[in-house]
Amino acid sequence: MSVSAASSTTRSAIKIETPLHMFWADFCANRIALIALAVVSVLALISVLSPWIAPQNPYDLTQISIFDNMLKPLQRSQEGKLFVLGSDEQGRDMLSAMMYGLKMSLFVAITATTAALCVGVSLGIIAAYFGGRVDAVLMRLVDLQLSFPAILIALILLAVLGKGVDKVIFALMLVQWAYYARTVRGNAMVERRREYIEAAQCLALPRHRIIFRHLLPNCLGPLIVVATVQVAHAISLEATLSFLGVGVPITEPSLGLLISNGYKYILSGKYWVSIYPGLLLLLTIVSINLVGDHLRDLLNPRLKA
Amino acid sequence: MSVLLDVQNLSTHFFTRAGRVPAVNDVSFSIGAGQVLGLVGESGSGKTVTGLSIMGIVDPPGRIVSGSIKLDGQELVGLDEAHWRKIRGNRIAMIFQDPMMTLNPVLRIETQMIETIKAHEAISDDAARQRCREALGNVGIPSPEERLSAYPHQFSGGMRQRVVIAIAMLLRPSLIIADEPTTALDVTIQAQIIAQVQKLAAETGTAIVWVTHDLAVVSGLSDRLAVMYAGRIIEEGATEQVLNFPRHPYTRGLLDSLPINNQRGQPLNQIPGATPSLLALPKGCAFAPRCALRQEDCEQGSIVETFHKEGRRWTCLHPVQDRAR
Amino acid sequence: MLAFILRRLGQSAFLLIAMAVLVFVSIFAIGDPIEVLLPADADQNEREAAIRHLGLDQPLWMQFAHFVWNLLHGDLGKSFVFGSDSLSLILGRLPATLELALVALILAALIGIPLGLIAGLKSQTWIGRLIMTTSIVGFSLPNFWFGIVMILVFAVQLQWLPSGGRGPTDTLFGIEFSLLNPQGWVNLIMPAATLAIYKVSLVIRLAYAGTREALLQDYVRFARAKGLSSSRIIGVHILKNILIPIVTVLGLELGSMIAFAVVTESVFAWPGMGKLLIDSIARLDRPVIVAYLMLVVTLFALINLCVDILYSVLDPRVRLSEGQS
């Protein structure tokens, strides 16, 4: 008796919670995803705070000494400073370089993804709402772009544009927008035929209001998933481009460039210069992907039952 | 008449994250050889899971938790997979609701037919093919030889269901469980399929459990009728008796809500409320909250006892007294 | 079928022309090759001679007309660096890249399909979860870094495998193959594994999703109801259904493999056309970059065409609708 009464009160308690609360409760049910989310948050915090918490500023020439070069992890410098993860060929502390590198990697990826999201969503929803020739032209463009691997497009583009943080961001945006455009369009095509859009049209609401206040919010779920996965993808792509020598400039290295710098020492067994930045890169990407993967499961109505 | 299938106190529960769902609860019935039993209920009443339990193909998180299923005296519950597999398709066959989904879209009809025979008999391809051709002919498919090498999507819905029936009849089972086999079809096709199954069953002496939500469909088809509600059989008896003199208020409600029992200009009779969640069944009679004849004692005790009288039974303390309209 | 192929060929030709314009215009903007090619102390006369020799003194449209004219003759210009025909330079490196990509593709299918199938069948067990979580790690691994770790472990620490290069090859039909030489296998295994790792994860996820989807389908239930063994249900009914999308995706991924080989070849100093592309970008060797792009676009168009044909052969539903139209 008391058990059934207790369970019925908890059930009614859940019912009055907002959808966001319920979503959060569902999300927390997966321990791995929760840990991954915590890791992502910590990494983001470290990268933002890196100028204050890093042992040294690796790009301030007054703080580094060439005599400290290629120290092994946990070795001390001549001045007695501890290099927890060793140092690189110019005597920079690897831990500090990684923190700054993480900041650069996240900055490039998140900026590019946000830009691509704006461009892709606008074009996708325009294609879906107007249909007809606009839709046909835009979607041909999307098909054309998606039929070529992102790495190849970005590589050639950067070969043309040259190095630079802004150029990398532009290239990453250009290879990403098509994913959002296609996702939004696919969803909006379904949503557009729903009654609430018809109702909004009957009310003679302005077109931009229907599109942005009624249509767009109902297409958000899949977009969140795609955006999460694309941030991870952008981090990986930027690292790859930097490794190939067409990414960020040597003065503002990302994790990918740090790995690239250490690559030439691999054969002599000096592993730390490229293995540690790689581990951090992997941790970042895996955590984001784990979060994205769980979000996808949660937002997939077909797996709900 | 000898008893072919005897189900006693069968319970199949689903162990979900939200809790234990008693989809089939303490269900008992039996069928004689060549008989047709209509198993009637709304969706979610447990009629399909009853069918799947008899086939031994309840998917996890569901499983048979207690009870007995005897086929010709042989106990099926607790049988290992290898033995149960030999019974499926061979002695008991099952037909599903949607013929569009039942056949594998990427395999030829002959592949899907021959594999059925070969799963149970050592037989040459040619002999098996010959039998498949005859089986297709028997269910009224024209030019069976050509149709054998076709793919499912080349058939119409009605024709596909005929193919499914042909597969079910391939090994001359003594029992067929037909799970709403006509629900997804047009009304004219429905009648054809029902007539076809009736004819075949009569010719071969096959017993049928006809699972449906549609009383009108089974009324002309079945010898006996069992009505399910919230995982239990709440009334059972000879079809004619149940239809003419329902004892359980739920059965009465079902009958009253048939359009044919309503008058033009009058609002349709309906049962108020909705089926209860199996996760939170009310105390006493599960139907009580919706029942017009409810009295205080209906909502007490764990379950309502079953009353037997003159070859029929019902699970109701205050049964309907007057005859159906 | 023929009309279908012709239509696709027409589309591919249009794509090629569009790409030719795009490639030319974009490549024209890449730096000034003279700066790279001539020594810093070259005098004005030497510069002008070089510009005239490379045809850089002509107006853009002339260069483009020249480019298209030569393109039609299969002449994509001479490499600034090597001085030889750029197309034959690229074609000479093509077999190494194709071999690498194909071996990686086969690896991905051989490892990914069984793992994904197991994960899908046992999605509620620890083994299923382990496979799927591992696949996310594989999905996330930066390709080049994984290659570096492989070199560190297998070449530097364990010294089992060479750190890079193609190693010895044997010749068949005038083309060199690593696969024909046992020593070649040793050199091939690390680059191929590195290139395959991402696709393994992709195939696992496809096979997993496909299997879970198929398990919910009525045709799997019906197959069980027919009494088929689980090996037959998994090996024929499920596998055939999930193979269609996997084969299609894998075919399409061959193009992305060839593109991603750029990274793998750079890490392992594999003498394929990807390595040549990176070197050419660094040296601003415009004709080689153009030749690479044109070849890759052609390859992609060819691959897409083959996959479309393969898909229509595999899936009976597509086969029929094409035949009717």
Image: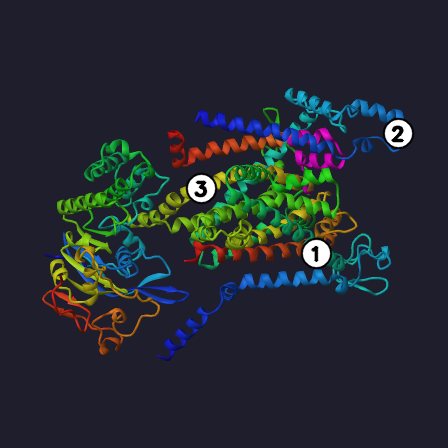
- Which residue is more in the foreground, C256 or B323? B323
Q: Secondary structure at mark 1?
A: helix
As drawn, the label of residue A102 is: 1
Q: Residue at x 40, y 66 (%)?
A: B18
Q: Chain of mark 1?
A: A
Magenta-drawn stretch contains A32? no
Q: Are marks 2 and 3 on the same chain?
A: yes
Q: Residue at x 84, y 60 (%)?
A: A63
- Magenta segment, principal secondary structure? helix
Name the residue: 60% across, 34% down: C98
Q: Is residue C293 visible?
A: yes
Judging depth in this view, the residue of C251 and B197 nearest the camera is B197
> Which residue extends farthest bottom?
A2
The x and y percentages for residue C173 are 58, 24
Name the quadrant of the C terminus of chain A. Answer: bottom left
Region in magenta: C267-293
**Quick one: which residue is furthest to the front in this view?**
A204
**C-alpha span from label 3 to label 1:** 40 Å
Query: Label for residue C88?
Result: none
Q: Is C279 covered by the magenta stretch?
A: yes
Q: Mark 1 and 2 residues: CB-CB less than 8 Å, in contact?
A: no
Q: Chain of mark 2?
A: C
Note whether B308 is above or below A157 in the view shown.
below
Q: Which residue is mark 3?
A: C243
Residue C42, label in figure: 2
Q: Position of residue C257 (x, y in %)?
A: 59, 39
Q: Is residue B24 left or right of residue A119?
A: left
